[in-house]
Image: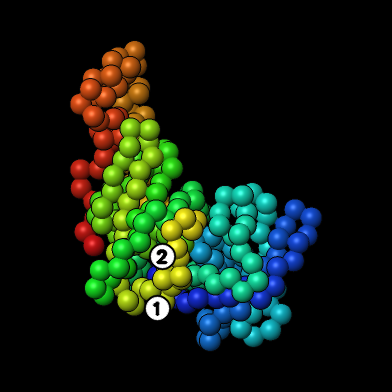
Amino acid sequence: MFTGIVQGIASVMRIDERPGLRSFHLRFPEGFDEGLAIGASVAVDGTCLTVTARPAPGEATFDVMQQSLALTTLVALRQGSRINVERAARDGAEIGGHPLSGHVDFMAAVAEIRRPENNHVLRIAVPSPWMRYVFAKGYIAVNGASLTVAEAARERDGSGWFEVWLIPETLRQTTFGEKGVGDALNVEVERSTQVFVDTVREAIDERLGPLLPLLEEMLARQGRTLDDMARPAALPPQ
């Protein structure tokens, strides 16, 4: 498990192609790898990876299978790429963000960047059907960082967008300041919200049965969807 508090920025030293695997050799910021053993977990841009080798102090190797490459932005990493990293949480550790599994749900893209004074705003485009799990003032993990959704909007087809506001300290500790419009990002939805939404949707499907198409038609005339009915009534405060 991870907390979503990025602990530093690592860089890709080398990439080796192997049958069914791609091996990434990373260099960590000073002190990050103290006590890091083979078999330990590290979140790399929000993707949970296992240490497979420790060639030198400050370095580690990770093997990534093809499925993980296809589902995350790791496929686009090149020598010199910079990524957010976090060590696995220890028992009793303070969770300054929110609990993360390191299992990326989908890739999104930077749709717009605004820079009001002392802030940095990313608008992130979300593919269908993932917007059903994204709500204003809720938690979201982007490239391994636990962030608060400031604004969100959902389209009728299940796609949409959300915005996050980043303070200077977040920009210093992460790679978000290096991202441009169109860049891909790893996103992990907040798991309890996903469970709540899916449970409500399944209950609606089970109870309404044949009436479901009529309800969907009625909601559509009002500009709403079943996902709106499954929205949590209250989200945890930040």
Give the colour scheme shown.
rainbow
What residue is shown with label 2?
145
Q: CA distance from mark 1 to mark 2?
A: 13 Å
Q: With 72 as the anchor, is 8 left or right in this view? A: left
Q: Of the residues shown, which amino acid type is indicated by label 2?
A: Ala
Residue occupying the point 36% across, 57% down = 112
Q: Secondary structure at mark 1?
A: helix
- Across and down, in percent, residue 133 comes to 35, 44
Q: Secondary structure at mark 2?
A: strand
Q: Nearer the viewer, residue 205 or 155?
A: 155
Q: Of the residues shown, which amino acid type is indicated by label 1?
A: Arg
Q: Nearer the viewer, residue 226 or 53?
A: 226
Q: Earlier in the sequence, mark 1 or mark 2?
A: 2
What residue is shown with label 1?
172
Q: Is residue 60 visible?
A: no
Q: With 14 as the anchor, is 142 left or right in this view? A: left
Residue occupying the point 68% across, 63% down = 63
Asked where in the image residue 18 lies, by quadrant, the reply is bottom right
Residue occupying the point 42% across, 68% down = 176
Q: In this rendering, is residue 201 above or below 131? A: above
Q: Are marks 1 and 2 in contact (CB under 8 Å)?
A: no
Q: Looking at this rendering, what residue extends furthest in the right direction?
A: 19
| Structural crowding at the residue carrying mark 2, measured as other residues with C-alpha within 10 Å and reported as few (<14), some (14–19) or many (≥20) | many
Q: In this rendering, is residue 226 above or below 109? A: above
Q: Which numbered dot is residue 3?
A: none
- Across and down, in percent, residue 104 comes to 50, 53
Q: In this rendering, is residue 206 above or below 125? A: above
Q: With 83 as the anchor, is 214 left or right in this view? A: left
Q: Quadrant of the C terminus?
A: bottom left
Q: How many marks?
A: 2
